[in-house]
Image (cartoon, rainbow, N blue to C red):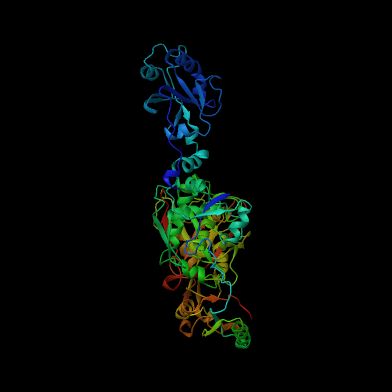
Amino acid sequence: MMSSDLPPVPPLPDGLVAVVKRDCPTCELVAPVLSDLHERADLTVITQDDPHFPAEADWVHHDTDLALSWHHDIETVPTLLQVSGGVGEQRTVGWSRSEWEQLSGLDGLGRGLPDWRPGCGSLSVDPAHAGELAVRFSGSSLQSRRVELASLEDEWEAMWDRGWSDGLPVVPPTEARVLRMLESTTRDPSEVAAVVPPSLVECTVEKVAVNAVMAGCAPEHLPVVIAALEAVCTDEFNMHGVLATTMSVGPVLVVNGPVAERIGMNSGINSLGQGNRANSTIGRALQLVVRNVGGGHPGGVDRATFGSPAKVGFCFAEDEAGSPWTSLAESRGWRADQSTVTVFTGESPRILADERSRTPESLTKHLAQALQATVSPRMMLGMDAMLVLSPEHMARYADAGWSRDRFTEELSAELTFDGDDLLAGAGGIAAGLPPTAAGQRIPKFRPGGLLVVHSGGPAGLFSAIIGGWANGPRGSDPVTREITP
Amino acid sequence: MTTVLDPTSEQAPAARELATRPESLAGLTVGLLDISKPRGNVFLDRVSERLSGLGATVNRYTKPTFTKPAPIDLRHEIATTCDAVIEALAD
Protein backbone atom coordinates (compact mmCIF):
# COMPACT_ATOMS: atom_id res chain seq x y z
CA MET A 1 0.00 0.00 0.00
CA MET A 2 1.34 3.45 -0.86
CA SER A 3 1.60 5.83 2.04
CA SER A 4 -0.61 8.32 0.21
CA ASP A 5 -3.45 5.76 0.37
CA LEU A 6 -3.35 5.74 4.15
CA PRO A 7 -6.10 7.39 6.15
CA PRO A 8 -5.00 10.68 7.78
CA VAL A 9 -4.05 10.72 11.45
CA PRO A 10 -7.16 11.85 13.35
CA PRO A 11 -6.52 14.59 15.94
CA LEU A 12 -7.58 14.25 19.57
CA PRO A 13 -9.82 17.03 20.90
CA ASP A 14 -7.75 19.68 22.67
CA GLY A 15 -7.82 19.94 26.46
CA LEU A 16 -8.19 17.14 28.93
CA VAL A 17 -8.99 13.73 27.37
CA ALA A 18 -9.52 10.29 28.91
CA VAL A 19 -9.46 7.07 26.86
CA VAL A 20 -11.50 4.30 28.49
CA LYS A 21 -13.46 1.10 27.89
CA ARG A 22 -16.37 -0.30 29.86
CA ASP A 23 -14.78 -3.74 29.99
CA CYS A 24 -12.16 -2.52 32.47
CA PRO A 25 -12.79 -2.51 36.23
CA THR A 26 -10.49 0.48 36.76
CA CYS A 27 -12.42 2.52 34.16
CA GLU A 28 -15.69 1.56 35.91
CA LEU A 29 -14.12 2.58 39.22
CA VAL A 30 -13.15 6.04 37.96
CA ALA A 31 -16.45 6.72 36.12
CA PRO A 32 -17.49 9.30 38.81
CA VAL A 33 -14.11 11.01 38.44
CA LEU A 34 -14.68 11.30 34.69
CA SER A 35 -18.00 13.09 35.25
CA ASP A 36 -16.39 15.32 37.85
CA LEU A 37 -13.54 16.19 35.48
CA HIS A 38 -16.00 16.99 32.70
CA GLU A 39 -17.88 19.42 34.93
CA ARG A 40 -14.83 21.08 36.39
CA ALA A 41 -12.32 20.89 33.50
CA ASP A 42 -14.33 20.19 30.33
CA LEU A 43 -12.95 16.65 29.98
CA THR A 44 -13.68 14.74 26.77
CA VAL A 45 -13.96 10.95 27.02
CA ILE A 46 -12.96 8.61 24.20
CA THR A 47 -14.62 5.25 24.77
CA GLN A 48 -13.42 2.14 22.97
CA ASP A 49 -16.25 -0.34 23.41
CA ASP A 50 -19.59 0.88 24.84
CA PRO A 51 -20.46 4.19 23.11
CA HIS A 52 -22.44 5.29 26.20
CA PHE A 53 -19.73 4.70 28.78
CA PRO A 54 -19.45 6.42 31.22
CA ALA A 55 -22.54 8.38 30.09
CA GLU A 56 -24.73 9.05 27.08
CA ALA A 57 -23.49 12.57 26.47
CA ASP A 58 -21.96 14.80 23.82
CA TRP A 59 -18.64 14.82 25.67
CA VAL A 60 -18.34 11.03 25.26
CA HIS A 61 -16.98 10.06 21.82
CA HIS A 62 -16.94 6.52 20.52
CA ASP A 63 -13.62 5.42 18.97
CA THR A 64 -15.54 3.13 16.61
CA ASP A 65 -12.65 1.80 14.55
CA LEU A 66 -10.02 2.41 17.26
CA ALA A 67 -8.29 4.91 14.95
CA LEU A 68 -7.75 7.46 17.74
CA SER A 69 -6.46 4.85 20.16
CA TRP A 70 -4.16 3.31 17.57
CA HIS A 71 -2.74 6.54 16.19
CA HIS A 72 -2.14 8.07 19.59
CA ASP A 73 -0.42 4.94 20.97
CA ILE A 74 -2.91 4.20 23.72
CA GLU A 75 -1.69 0.98 25.34
CA THR A 76 -3.59 1.13 28.63
CA VAL A 77 -7.04 2.24 29.69
CA PRO A 78 -7.74 4.52 31.36
CA THR A 79 -5.21 6.93 29.89
CA LEU A 80 -5.58 10.59 30.87
CA LEU A 81 -4.02 13.07 28.44
CA GLN A 82 -3.43 16.79 28.24
CA VAL A 83 -3.94 17.50 24.53
CA SER A 84 -2.68 20.46 22.55
CA GLY A 85 -2.86 20.80 18.77
CA GLY A 86 -4.57 17.41 18.50
CA VAL A 87 -1.64 15.60 20.12
CA GLY A 88 -1.32 14.30 23.67
CA GLU A 89 1.53 16.23 25.27
CA GLN A 90 1.33 14.66 28.71
CA ARG A 91 -0.31 11.45 29.77
CA THR A 92 -0.75 9.11 32.71
CA VAL A 93 -2.01 5.53 32.59
CA GLY A 94 -4.22 3.64 35.02
CA TRP A 95 -5.72 5.45 38.03
CA SER A 96 -3.41 7.37 40.30
CA ARG A 97 -5.04 10.17 42.29
CA SER A 98 -1.84 12.15 42.60
CA GLU A 99 -0.97 11.90 38.91
CA TRP A 100 -4.51 12.69 37.77
CA GLU A 101 -4.58 15.72 40.07
CA GLN A 102 -1.23 16.87 38.82
CA LEU A 103 -2.20 16.46 35.13
CA SER A 104 -5.61 18.13 35.52
CA GLY A 105 -4.47 20.79 38.00
CA LEU A 106 -7.47 19.96 40.22
CA ASP A 107 -7.64 18.79 43.83
CA GLY A 108 -9.97 16.38 45.55
CA LEU A 109 -10.40 13.85 42.75
CA GLY A 110 -12.10 10.51 43.50
CA ARG A 111 -12.81 10.87 47.18
CA GLY A 112 -13.40 7.43 48.66
CA LEU A 113 -11.50 5.66 45.88
CA PRO A 114 -8.23 3.84 46.49
CA ASP A 115 -5.15 5.95 45.74
CA TRP A 116 -4.02 3.78 42.89
CA ARG A 117 -5.27 1.04 40.58
CA PRO A 118 -3.51 -0.38 37.49
CA GLY A 119 -5.35 -0.06 34.20
CA CYS A 120 -6.27 -2.67 31.59
CA GLY A 121 -4.99 -3.29 28.07
CA SER A 122 -6.26 -0.96 25.37
CA LEU A 123 -8.42 -2.64 22.72
CA SER A 124 -6.07 -1.21 20.10
CA VAL A 125 -3.22 -3.42 21.35
CA ASP A 126 -5.40 -6.49 21.88
CA PRO A 127 -3.68 -9.28 19.91
CA ALA A 128 -7.04 -10.06 18.30
CA HIS A 129 -7.13 -6.62 16.64
CA ALA A 130 -3.55 -5.41 16.50
CA GLY A 131 -2.69 -7.04 13.17
CA GLU A 132 -5.79 -5.73 11.42
CA LEU A 133 -5.27 -2.22 12.80
CA ALA A 134 -1.62 -2.17 11.77
CA VAL A 135 -2.56 -3.07 8.20
CA ARG A 136 -5.42 -0.56 8.15
CA PHE A 137 -3.59 2.41 9.61
CA SER A 138 0.11 1.99 8.89
CA GLY A 139 0.16 0.20 5.59
CA SER A 140 2.67 -2.56 5.52
CA SER A 141 6.34 -3.20 5.29
CA LEU A 142 5.77 -6.69 3.94
CA GLN A 143 7.35 -7.45 0.59
CA SER A 144 5.42 -10.46 -0.68
CA ARG A 145 3.44 -10.09 -3.86
CA ARG A 146 -0.26 -9.48 -3.20
CA VAL A 147 -2.58 -11.94 -4.87
CA GLU A 148 -6.21 -10.88 -5.08
CA LEU A 149 -8.70 -13.68 -4.96
CA ALA A 150 -11.89 -12.72 -6.81
CA SER A 151 -15.01 -12.22 -4.74
CA LEU A 152 -16.76 -15.16 -6.40
CA GLU A 153 -13.73 -17.37 -5.98
CA ASP A 154 -13.76 -19.77 -3.05
CA GLU A 155 -10.58 -18.93 -1.11
CA TRP A 156 -9.73 -22.51 -0.29
CA GLU A 157 -10.25 -23.73 -3.83
CA ALA A 158 -8.31 -20.77 -5.23
CA MET A 159 -5.26 -21.57 -3.12
CA TRP A 160 -5.50 -25.22 -4.09
CA ASP A 161 -5.72 -24.25 -7.79
CA ARG A 162 -2.55 -22.20 -7.47
CA GLY A 163 -0.65 -25.22 -6.24
CA TRP A 164 0.01 -23.84 -2.76
CA SER A 165 -1.36 -26.78 -0.81
CA ASP A 166 0.01 -30.16 0.17
CA GLY A 167 -3.48 -31.55 -0.41
CA LEU A 168 -4.98 -30.40 2.88
CA PRO A 169 -6.76 -27.08 3.38
CA VAL A 170 -4.50 -24.09 4.00
CA VAL A 171 -5.34 -20.93 5.95
CA PRO A 172 -5.49 -17.86 3.66
CA PRO A 173 -2.28 -15.88 4.39
CA THR A 174 -3.80 -12.42 4.71
CA GLU A 175 -1.58 -9.52 5.62
CA ALA A 176 -3.08 -9.25 9.11
CA ARG A 177 -2.46 -12.94 9.84
CA VAL A 178 1.12 -12.75 8.57
CA LEU A 179 1.83 -9.62 10.64
CA ARG A 180 0.44 -11.35 13.71
CA MET A 181 2.64 -14.39 12.97
CA LEU A 182 5.70 -12.17 12.67
CA GLU A 183 5.10 -10.63 16.09
CA SER A 184 6.48 -13.80 17.66
CA THR A 185 9.97 -13.31 16.25
CA THR A 186 12.44 -10.52 16.77
CA ARG A 187 13.93 -11.17 13.36
CA ASP A 188 13.39 -8.71 10.55
CA PRO A 189 10.80 -9.95 8.03
CA SER A 190 13.20 -9.20 5.18
CA GLU A 191 16.05 -11.22 6.69
CA VAL A 192 16.98 -14.32 4.70
CA ALA A 193 16.35 -17.33 6.95
CA ALA A 194 17.67 -19.98 4.58
CA VAL A 195 18.40 -20.85 0.97
CA VAL A 196 15.76 -23.44 0.22
CA PRO A 197 16.20 -26.37 -2.15
CA PRO A 198 15.51 -27.66 -4.69
CA SER A 199 15.42 -24.30 -6.51
CA LEU A 200 17.89 -22.75 -4.02
CA VAL A 201 15.68 -19.75 -3.36
CA GLU A 202 16.55 -17.21 -0.68
CA CYS A 203 13.65 -17.49 1.77
CA THR A 204 12.92 -14.52 4.00
CA VAL A 205 11.49 -14.71 7.51
CA GLU A 206 8.34 -13.17 5.98
CA LYS A 207 7.94 -16.07 3.52
CA VAL A 208 8.37 -18.54 6.37
CA ALA A 209 5.61 -16.68 8.23
CA VAL A 210 3.31 -16.77 5.19
CA ASN A 211 3.68 -20.53 4.94
CA ALA A 212 3.36 -20.96 8.70
CA VAL A 213 0.01 -19.16 8.55
CA MET A 214 -1.09 -21.47 5.74
CA ALA A 215 -0.01 -24.57 7.70
CA GLY A 216 -2.16 -23.48 10.64
CA CYS A 217 0.61 -22.46 13.03
CA ALA A 218 0.00 -20.16 15.97
CA PRO A 219 2.47 -17.24 16.14
CA GLU A 220 4.42 -18.81 19.00
CA HIS A 221 5.28 -21.74 16.72
CA LEU A 222 7.16 -19.59 14.20
CA PRO A 223 10.58 -19.58 15.91
CA VAL A 224 10.54 -23.40 15.86
CA VAL A 225 9.67 -23.43 12.15
CA ILE A 226 12.50 -20.99 11.40
CA ALA A 227 15.04 -23.03 13.39
CA ALA A 228 13.90 -26.23 11.68
CA LEU A 229 14.21 -24.59 8.27
CA GLU A 230 17.71 -23.40 9.08
CA ALA A 231 18.57 -26.93 10.19
CA VAL A 232 17.33 -28.72 7.07
CA CYS A 233 18.86 -26.17 4.69
CA THR A 234 22.42 -27.15 5.60
CA ASP A 235 24.92 -29.24 3.66
CA GLU A 236 24.89 -31.76 6.52
CA PHE A 237 21.14 -32.36 6.42
CA ASN A 238 20.91 -32.09 2.62
CA MET A 239 17.23 -31.24 2.16
CA HIS A 240 17.60 -31.49 -1.61
CA GLY A 241 18.55 -35.15 -1.40
CA VAL A 242 15.95 -35.89 1.28
CA LEU A 243 13.30 -34.45 -1.03
CA ALA A 244 14.53 -35.99 -4.26
CA THR A 245 15.27 -39.52 -3.08
CA THR A 246 13.04 -42.41 -4.06
CA MET A 247 13.25 -43.48 -0.40
CA SER A 248 10.09 -42.57 1.51
CA VAL A 249 11.64 -40.25 4.05
CA GLY A 250 11.23 -36.70 5.25
CA PRO A 251 12.46 -34.42 8.01
CA VAL A 252 11.48 -35.68 11.49
CA LEU A 253 11.57 -32.82 14.01
CA VAL A 254 12.22 -33.42 17.72
CA VAL A 255 11.80 -30.41 19.99
CA ASN A 256 13.73 -30.22 23.28
CA GLY A 257 13.98 -27.68 26.06
CA PRO A 258 11.65 -25.16 27.68
CA VAL A 259 10.01 -24.04 24.42
CA ALA A 260 8.20 -27.37 24.05
CA GLU A 261 6.02 -26.84 27.10
CA ARG A 262 5.72 -23.10 26.52
CA ILE A 263 4.07 -23.55 23.14
CA GLY A 264 1.97 -26.48 24.29
CA MET A 265 3.66 -29.30 22.40
CA ASN A 266 2.62 -32.86 23.04
CA SER A 267 5.20 -35.29 24.37
CA GLY A 268 2.65 -37.62 25.97
CA ILE A 269 -0.35 -39.62 24.76
CA ASN A 270 -0.38 -39.83 20.93
CA SER A 271 2.72 -37.64 20.68
CA LEU A 272 3.55 -38.93 17.20
CA GLY A 273 -0.07 -38.60 16.11
CA GLN A 274 -2.73 -36.01 15.49
CA GLY A 275 -4.60 -33.66 17.79
CA ASN A 276 -1.99 -31.16 18.96
CA ARG A 277 -1.71 -27.94 17.02
CA ALA A 278 2.02 -27.38 17.46
CA ASN A 279 2.98 -30.99 16.67
CA SER A 280 0.69 -31.04 13.63
CA THR A 281 1.51 -27.69 12.08
CA ILE A 282 5.23 -27.01 12.69
CA GLY A 283 6.42 -29.92 10.56
CA ARG A 284 3.79 -29.10 7.97
CA ALA A 285 4.89 -25.47 7.79
CA LEU A 286 8.45 -26.61 7.08
CA GLN A 287 7.24 -28.86 4.26
CA LEU A 288 5.10 -26.05 2.81
CA VAL A 289 8.17 -23.80 2.67
CA VAL A 290 10.06 -26.51 0.80
CA ARG A 291 7.09 -26.89 -1.54
CA ASN A 292 6.13 -23.28 -2.14
CA VAL A 293 9.41 -21.41 -1.79
CA GLY A 294 11.85 -24.18 -2.73
CA GLY A 295 9.64 -25.53 -5.49
CA GLY A 296 9.78 -29.14 -4.29
CA HIS A 297 6.74 -30.91 -5.66
CA PRO A 298 5.97 -34.65 -5.72
CA GLY A 299 6.55 -35.83 -9.26
CA GLY A 300 8.89 -32.88 -9.81
CA VAL A 301 12.13 -33.04 -7.87
CA ASP A 302 10.39 -35.12 -5.18
CA ARG A 303 10.69 -38.65 -6.61
CA ALA A 304 9.73 -40.74 -3.55
CA THR A 305 8.43 -44.17 -4.49
CA PHE A 306 5.81 -44.19 -1.77
CA GLY A 307 6.31 -41.07 0.27
CA SER A 308 4.81 -41.46 3.72
CA PRO A 309 2.38 -39.71 6.05
CA ALA A 310 5.52 -38.30 7.70
CA LYS A 311 6.10 -36.18 4.59
CA VAL A 312 3.03 -34.08 5.39
CA GLY A 313 4.87 -33.01 8.52
CA PHE A 314 6.39 -34.92 11.42
CA CYS A 315 7.16 -33.09 14.64
CA PHE A 316 6.98 -34.02 18.31
CA ALA A 317 8.54 -33.18 21.66
CA GLU A 318 10.62 -35.29 24.04
CA ASP A 319 9.13 -36.02 27.47
CA GLU A 320 12.08 -34.68 29.44
CA ALA A 321 10.33 -34.27 32.80
CA GLY A 322 9.36 -37.94 32.87
CA SER A 323 12.74 -39.26 31.76
CA PRO A 324 15.53 -40.39 34.05
CA TRP A 325 18.00 -39.82 31.20
CA THR A 326 19.57 -36.81 29.59
CA SER A 327 17.56 -35.59 26.64
CA LEU A 328 18.31 -36.17 22.97
CA ALA A 329 19.56 -32.59 22.71
CA GLU A 330 21.83 -33.00 25.73
CA SER A 331 23.23 -36.19 24.22
CA ARG A 332 24.13 -34.05 21.22
CA GLY A 333 25.95 -31.44 23.30
CA TRP A 334 23.23 -28.91 24.17
CA ARG A 335 22.20 -27.74 27.63
CA ALA A 336 18.89 -28.63 29.25
CA ASP A 337 17.91 -24.96 29.49
CA GLN A 338 18.37 -24.42 25.75
CA SER A 339 15.43 -24.88 23.40
CA THR A 340 16.40 -26.83 20.32
CA VAL A 341 15.00 -28.65 17.35
CA THR A 342 16.76 -31.72 15.99
CA VAL A 343 16.02 -32.72 12.40
CA PHE A 344 16.47 -36.32 11.35
CA THR A 345 15.74 -37.91 8.00
CA GLY A 346 13.22 -40.62 8.75
CA GLU A 347 10.35 -42.67 7.49
CA SER A 348 7.05 -43.26 9.30
CA PRO A 349 7.29 -44.86 12.75
CA ARG A 350 6.77 -48.55 13.29
CA ILE A 351 6.11 -50.23 16.64
CA LEU A 352 8.03 -52.83 18.60
CA ALA A 353 5.61 -54.50 21.01
CA ASP A 354 7.27 -56.06 24.04
CA GLU A 355 4.89 -56.75 26.90
CA ARG A 356 6.93 -59.56 28.47
CA SER A 357 10.39 -58.21 29.22
CA ARG A 358 10.91 -57.57 32.92
CA THR A 359 14.64 -56.90 32.72
CA PRO A 360 16.56 -54.28 30.77
CA GLU A 361 18.67 -57.05 29.20
CA SER A 362 15.63 -58.79 27.70
CA LEU A 363 14.14 -55.59 26.32
CA THR A 364 17.49 -54.48 24.89
CA LYS A 365 17.93 -57.76 22.98
CA HIS A 366 14.41 -57.47 21.61
CA LEU A 367 14.88 -53.83 20.58
CA ALA A 368 18.07 -54.82 18.80
CA GLN A 369 16.22 -57.41 16.73
CA ALA A 370 13.70 -54.82 15.64
CA LEU A 371 16.33 -52.17 14.98
CA GLN A 372 18.34 -54.56 12.82
CA ALA A 373 15.42 -54.63 10.40
CA THR A 374 15.37 -50.89 9.70
CA VAL A 375 15.67 -50.28 5.95
CA SER A 376 16.97 -53.86 5.52
CA PRO A 377 18.14 -56.39 8.10
CA ARG A 378 21.11 -57.02 5.83
CA MET A 379 22.23 -53.41 5.51
CA MET A 380 24.83 -52.26 8.04
CA LEU A 381 26.28 -48.83 8.88
CA GLY A 382 24.87 -46.92 5.93
CA MET A 383 21.67 -45.71 7.59
CA ASP A 384 20.82 -44.08 10.91
CA ALA A 385 17.64 -44.62 12.93
CA MET A 386 15.61 -43.06 15.72
CA LEU A 387 14.24 -45.01 18.66
CA VAL A 388 11.37 -43.49 20.65
CA LEU A 389 11.19 -45.24 24.02
CA SER A 390 7.78 -45.09 25.68
CA PRO A 391 7.51 -44.37 29.41
CA GLU A 392 6.65 -48.01 30.21
CA HIS A 393 9.68 -49.29 28.32
CA MET A 394 11.83 -46.57 29.86
CA ALA A 395 10.70 -47.82 33.28
CA ARG A 396 12.62 -51.08 32.69
CA TYR A 397 15.82 -49.03 32.45
CA ALA A 398 14.93 -46.57 35.20
CA ASP A 399 14.14 -49.40 37.63
CA ALA A 400 17.47 -51.06 36.91
CA GLY A 401 19.40 -47.81 37.15
CA TRP A 402 20.65 -47.83 33.56
CA SER A 403 21.84 -44.48 32.20
CA ARG A 404 21.64 -43.36 28.58
CA ASP A 405 25.33 -44.27 28.17
CA ARG A 406 24.86 -47.75 29.65
CA PHE A 407 21.87 -48.35 27.38
CA THR A 408 23.78 -47.18 24.29
CA GLU A 409 26.69 -49.44 25.16
CA GLU A 410 24.58 -52.54 25.77
CA LEU A 411 22.38 -51.96 22.74
CA SER A 412 25.40 -51.40 20.49
CA ALA A 413 26.77 -54.76 21.60
CA GLU A 414 23.47 -56.45 20.71
CA LEU A 415 23.47 -54.64 17.36
CA THR A 416 26.83 -56.04 16.24
CA PHE A 417 26.58 -59.05 13.93
CA ASP A 418 28.70 -61.69 12.26
CA GLY A 419 29.44 -60.49 8.76
CA ASP A 420 29.33 -64.06 7.49
CA ASP A 421 25.58 -64.26 8.17
CA LEU A 422 24.90 -61.12 6.19
CA LEU A 423 27.04 -61.63 3.09
CA ALA A 424 25.40 -61.14 -0.28
CA GLY A 425 23.90 -64.47 -1.23
CA ALA A 426 23.97 -65.86 2.33
CA GLY A 427 20.72 -67.63 3.17
CA GLY A 428 19.68 -67.49 -0.48
CA ILE A 429 19.21 -63.70 -0.45
CA ALA A 430 21.09 -61.74 -3.08
CA ALA A 431 21.24 -58.54 -1.04
CA GLY A 432 23.92 -58.32 1.61
CA LEU A 433 27.41 -57.27 2.58
CA PRO A 434 30.46 -57.48 0.27
CA PRO A 435 32.98 -60.35 0.61
CA THR A 436 35.29 -58.10 2.66
CA ALA A 437 32.82 -58.42 5.55
CA ALA A 438 33.53 -62.16 5.86
CA GLY A 439 34.91 -63.03 9.28
CA GLN A 440 34.23 -59.50 10.59
CA ARG A 441 31.95 -58.27 13.36
CA ILE A 442 29.84 -55.48 11.87
CA PRO A 443 27.76 -52.92 13.80
CA LYS A 444 24.32 -51.94 12.51
CA PHE A 445 24.81 -48.25 13.27
CA ARG A 446 27.76 -45.89 13.14
CA PRO A 447 28.68 -44.18 16.47
CA GLY A 448 25.90 -41.67 17.20
CA GLY A 449 23.80 -43.16 14.39
CA LEU A 450 20.96 -44.20 16.68
CA LEU A 451 19.03 -41.26 18.11
CA VAL A 452 17.14 -42.17 21.30
CA VAL A 453 14.18 -40.09 22.51
CA HIS A 454 11.70 -40.53 25.36
CA SER A 455 8.11 -39.73 24.41
CA GLY A 456 4.59 -41.13 24.39
CA GLY A 457 1.70 -41.91 26.71
CA PRO A 458 2.05 -43.51 30.15
CA ALA A 459 0.44 -46.81 29.19
CA GLY A 460 1.68 -49.22 26.54
CA LEU A 461 4.68 -51.52 26.48
CA PHE A 462 5.70 -50.38 23.00
CA SER A 463 8.46 -48.38 21.48
CA ALA A 464 8.52 -46.64 18.12
CA ILE A 465 11.29 -47.09 15.58
CA ILE A 466 11.86 -44.60 12.80
CA GLY A 467 14.10 -45.89 10.05
CA GLY A 468 16.53 -43.48 8.42
CA TRP A 469 18.18 -42.78 5.11
CA ALA A 470 21.70 -42.78 3.71
CA ASN A 471 23.94 -41.12 6.28
CA GLY A 472 27.07 -39.02 6.12
CA PRO A 473 28.29 -36.92 3.20
CA ARG A 474 26.52 -39.13 0.65
CA GLY A 475 23.18 -38.60 2.40
CA SER A 476 21.98 -36.78 5.47
CA ASP A 477 23.30 -36.16 8.97
CA PRO A 478 21.00 -35.18 11.86
CA VAL A 479 21.29 -31.47 12.69
CA THR A 480 20.31 -29.65 15.91
CA ARG A 481 19.63 -25.91 16.01
CA GLU A 482 18.81 -23.63 18.90
CA ILE A 483 15.36 -22.05 18.81
CA THR A 484 15.73 -18.33 19.44
CA PRO A 485 13.09 -15.60 19.58
CA MET B 1 -12.45 -10.06 -2.23
CA THR B 2 -9.60 -11.46 -0.16
CA THR B 3 -6.02 -10.36 -0.68
CA VAL B 4 -3.42 -12.90 0.33
CA LEU B 5 0.36 -12.88 0.31
CA ASP B 6 2.06 -15.04 -2.27
CA PRO B 7 3.72 -17.97 -0.43
CA THR B 8 5.98 -18.88 -3.36
CA SER B 9 9.38 -17.74 -4.59
CA GLU B 10 7.51 -15.40 -6.97
CA GLN B 11 9.54 -16.63 -9.90
CA ALA B 12 6.37 -17.23 -11.90
CA PRO B 13 4.05 -14.31 -12.80
CA ALA B 14 0.76 -14.19 -10.88
CA ALA B 15 -1.16 -13.66 -14.09
CA ARG B 16 -0.04 -13.56 -17.69
CA GLU B 17 -1.69 -11.37 -20.27
CA LEU B 18 -2.66 -12.91 -23.59
CA ALA B 19 -0.81 -11.65 -26.65
CA THR B 20 -2.88 -9.65 -29.12
CA ARG B 21 -4.66 -11.95 -31.56
CA PRO B 22 -3.91 -11.40 -35.27
CA GLU B 23 -7.02 -10.84 -37.41
CA SER B 24 -5.62 -13.01 -40.17
CA LEU B 25 -2.68 -15.34 -40.70
CA ALA B 26 -2.07 -14.02 -44.23
CA GLY B 27 1.52 -12.83 -44.53
CA LEU B 28 2.49 -13.97 -41.03
CA THR B 29 5.13 -16.55 -40.13
CA VAL B 30 3.87 -19.48 -38.08
CA GLY B 31 6.20 -21.91 -36.35
CA LEU B 32 5.51 -25.63 -35.99
CA LEU B 33 7.70 -27.55 -33.55
CA ASP B 34 7.99 -31.29 -34.01
CA ILE B 35 8.67 -32.77 -30.58
CA SER B 36 10.11 -35.94 -32.12
CA LYS B 37 7.31 -38.33 -31.32
CA PRO B 38 6.84 -41.05 -34.00
CA ARG B 39 4.68 -39.88 -36.96
CA GLY B 40 4.36 -36.39 -35.58
CA ASN B 41 5.81 -35.19 -38.88
CA VAL B 42 2.87 -36.71 -40.81
CA PHE B 43 0.42 -34.75 -38.71
CA LEU B 44 2.44 -31.54 -38.97
CA ASP B 45 2.82 -31.88 -42.77
CA ARG B 46 -0.95 -31.66 -43.05
CA VAL B 47 -1.18 -28.75 -40.60
CA SER B 48 1.51 -26.98 -42.62
CA GLU B 49 -0.47 -27.44 -45.85
CA ARG B 50 -3.60 -25.95 -44.29
CA LEU B 51 -1.71 -22.98 -42.83
CA SER B 52 -0.03 -22.25 -46.18
CA GLY B 53 -3.50 -22.28 -47.74
CA LEU B 54 -4.42 -19.46 -45.33
CA GLY B 55 -1.51 -17.37 -46.62
CA ALA B 56 0.92 -18.04 -43.78
CA THR B 57 4.59 -18.79 -44.16
CA VAL B 58 5.37 -21.93 -42.17
CA ASN B 59 8.73 -22.55 -40.46
CA ARG B 60 9.39 -26.09 -39.29
CA TYR B 61 11.47 -26.95 -36.19
CA THR B 62 12.36 -30.17 -34.43
CA LYS B 63 13.59 -30.65 -30.91
CA PRO B 64 16.07 -33.43 -30.15
CA THR B 65 13.92 -35.52 -27.81
CA PHE B 66 10.40 -35.43 -26.44
CA THR B 67 11.68 -36.29 -22.95
CA LYS B 68 13.30 -32.93 -22.38
CA PRO B 69 12.30 -29.31 -22.84
CA ALA B 70 13.29 -27.63 -26.11
CA PRO B 71 16.82 -26.21 -25.96
CA ILE B 72 16.91 -22.54 -25.13
CA ASP B 73 18.55 -21.59 -28.46
CA LEU B 74 15.72 -23.26 -30.36
CA ARG B 75 13.10 -21.48 -28.26
CA HIS B 76 14.90 -18.21 -28.90
CA GLU B 77 15.00 -18.82 -32.64
CA ILE B 78 11.27 -19.61 -32.76
CA ALA B 79 10.41 -16.58 -30.65
CA THR B 80 12.43 -14.18 -32.82
CA THR B 81 11.47 -15.48 -36.26
CA CYS B 82 7.79 -16.31 -35.90
CA ASP B 83 4.77 -14.01 -35.58
CA ALA B 84 2.40 -16.58 -34.15
CA VAL B 85 2.51 -19.78 -32.21
CA ILE B 86 -0.09 -22.50 -32.15
CA GLU B 87 0.25 -24.06 -28.74
CA ALA B 88 -0.98 -27.60 -28.70
CA LEU B 89 0.17 -31.08 -27.80
CA ALA B 90 -0.96 -34.29 -29.47
CA ASP B 91 0.15 -37.86 -28.98
| Rendering coords of residue A305 (x, y %) | 59, 72
What percent of the width, then of the height, locates residue A67?
48, 34
Residue B10 vs A131, above or below: the answer is: below
Residue A356 figure quarter: bottom right
Q: What residue is drawn where x is 54% and y is 68%?
A: B20
Identity of the residue drawn at 47% across and 50% down: A222
Residue A472 shows up from this direction? yes
Foreground of the two, A146 or A217:
A146
Q: Is residue A360 above or below residue A80?
A: below
Front position in the image: A395 or A5: A5
The one nearer the camera, A141 or A15, is: A15
Q: Residue A362 or A208: which is nearer the viewer? A: A208
Q: Position of residue A261 (x, y in %)?
A: 50, 46
The mark total stands at 0
> Quadrant location of residue A170?
bottom right
Image location of residue A63, percent across then percent down? 51, 30
Q: Which residue is drawn at 43% across and 71% down?
A: A472
Q: Looking at the image, can residue B66 be seen?
A: no
